[in-house]
Amino acid sequence: MLHGFRWGIGLSAMATVLGGLGMWRAERMAQPELAEVPFPKFAQLPTLPPLPLPPPTLDGLAKQIRVRVVSATSGEPLAGAMVALLRGPVDLAQPLEAALTNREGVALFTETQAGLFTICARGAGHEEDCEAEVGVVAGGELSVDLRLPPGAVIEGQVVQQDGLPAAGVRLMAMGTTVNGRLTVMPTQAVTDAEGRYRLDGVTPGYVRVTPFTSEGQGSVRAPDAEVQAGEVARLDIRLAGFAPVTVHVDPVTNGLGDVDVRSVSLSGPLRRQPDGSWTGMSEAGAQDAGASGYISWLWAHGETKVTLTPGVAATVRVRFAAPKGLIARRPPPKEEDDTSGRFELAGRVFLRDGTPVKGVRVSTEVPMFIGPCGNEPRFHSHHRFDGAEFVIRPMAGVREVYAWLDDGRAGKLTAVGREGERVSADIWLEETGAVVGQLEVGDDYYTDNREVIIVDDMWYGVWHRTRQDGSFIVAGLSPGKHVLQTPAGIVNFNINARERTDLGLLKAQPPAELSSAEP
């Protein structure tokens, strides 16, 4: 019996185990492993393109503008140099939008309005260097490197009409270099309690100094001779006192149409009044009252000599007429309104594979308001942006807009815009190349002289930049053989896509000597 009992217990236990295994197997059968089944291609949804980004804009603050300033001779960073953002022609009566460099020679602008600039710098013992036509969009960044050549110093004393020192007089110096280039950024100084001043960092050449007092803008003064680099020139100024002036402009239209007087000035600009007259303060003494502007599409001007007495009001009449021979295609926009007659074009620049570029120049033709003489090249703006985004302001109408990189890749589009309109369009670059080189130039060389470079019998102003030192680049050239024509002669060269063909220094050819046998 005991043996049968043990067998009964064993069978019962085995049944329990087998029953448990059966339940586990049944549970596995009830919860099978999931297998991935391919989704039928015909039922798959198409890939949606990314949402379009809003076009860039100038309506907002730039994230950062970083300007590094070094000495052109030593390469050392210059601390305490003044860096200015110039958004248009400089008004000497207004302060500059400026910052000073730190010990590393870096000036940062972090709370400045986006826009299109010329960026210049000056430092103690160093004249200006500028990068013209740069731009930064709202939220964007811009980096600029400037190298300052040696400069000059002008110092002296400013006294009042009675000979007493004139304290707090602001002096602004502008000049013309030896090659005829006008300086862009003024050198500034303020007289101390003894009326003394020091203009450090003046551009060598012919310098004009304008004093600004609490009464008004004084007459322009200049040193007796050209100022040399490293020189300390002397210029003492005796103010002549000021007088209130009213100028009436008498136009001579000869039936031509509308009269547009843009400015009237004596020692400084006057303000237009509702009755059409112009009023303000002028320094006393012998002055020229001048008016400039347009009559219809003709440039017009007028000038009258006048002698003013300190404190005595004067009324002057100026004849305003259009000289013969100077015909404008249309009056240019007024300098105080850079949007007049223009539209805003915003977009991005891409490589052929859709990659946004990391830095680009965007150019378009600059209208010539005075008709050209003969077969002359057209001039173009060349705004540089650090990223792929750009905003420029072409003249209203149908405009060709070009974009190019320093490696030669370039592209273009045709944009159409009405005055005040905002237009958005992107530019895609083609697989082109560039030619670079340097012309041997003299003191009479005029900066940005585009007409001296001709490729394949064409001026490439849209993709072409020539610098003051004679170095040049022409981008947008298709791969293959090309011909360059310069004052140095004719050069044959080859272009590869995405490459710069460097022609080196091109020396001017000496004039052919006449044979002694020739008459």
Image (tube, rainbow, N blue to C red):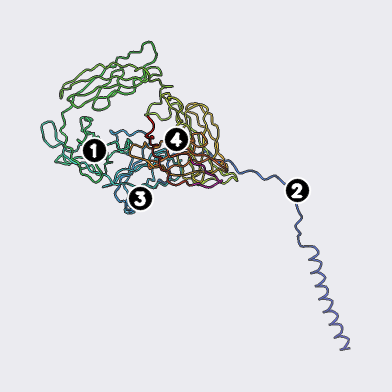
Label 3, label 1: how many angstroms apart (C-alpha)? 32 Å
Label 4 belongs to which residue? 381
How many angstroms separate mark 4 from mark 1 (CA)?
Answer: 32 Å
Badge 3 vs badge 1, beta-carbon distance below 8 Å: no
Residue depicted at 35% across the width and 40% down the height: 442
Q: Are marks 1 and 2 in contact (CB under 8 Å)?
A: no
Q: Mark 2 points at which residue?
A: 41
Q: Which of marks 4 and 1 is in front?
A: 1
How far separated are the C-alphas under marks 3 and 2? 58 Å
Q: Position of residue 487 (x, y in %)?
A: 42, 37
Find residue 428 and report its horizontal and vertical position in percent.
57, 40
Q: Earlier in the sequence, mark 4 or mark 3?
A: 3
Cα distance between the residues tagged 4 and 3: 27 Å
Q: Above or below — where is 485 with respect to 80? A: above
Circle 1 crowding by C-alpha within 10 Å: few under 14, some 14–19, many from 20: some
Q: What element carries label 1?
A: loop
Mark with earlier residue (4, 1): 1
User: What distance separates the C-alpha of mark 1 from that of mark 2?
Assistant: 81 Å
The mark total stands at 4
Residue bearing the label numbered 3: 106
Badge 1 or badge 2: first in the primary sequence: 2
Could you tell whether 409 is left or right of 371 in the image? right
Q: Is residue 280 left or right of residue 363?
A: left
Residue drawn at (84%, 82%) of the image: 10
Dominant secondary structure (helix, strand or loop) of the stretch shown in magenta: strand
Q: Is mark 3 on a helix, strand or loop?
A: strand
Dot 2 amino acid type = Lys
* Residue on which disc 1 sits: 226
What is the span of residues highlighted in magenta in the rendered image?
491-501
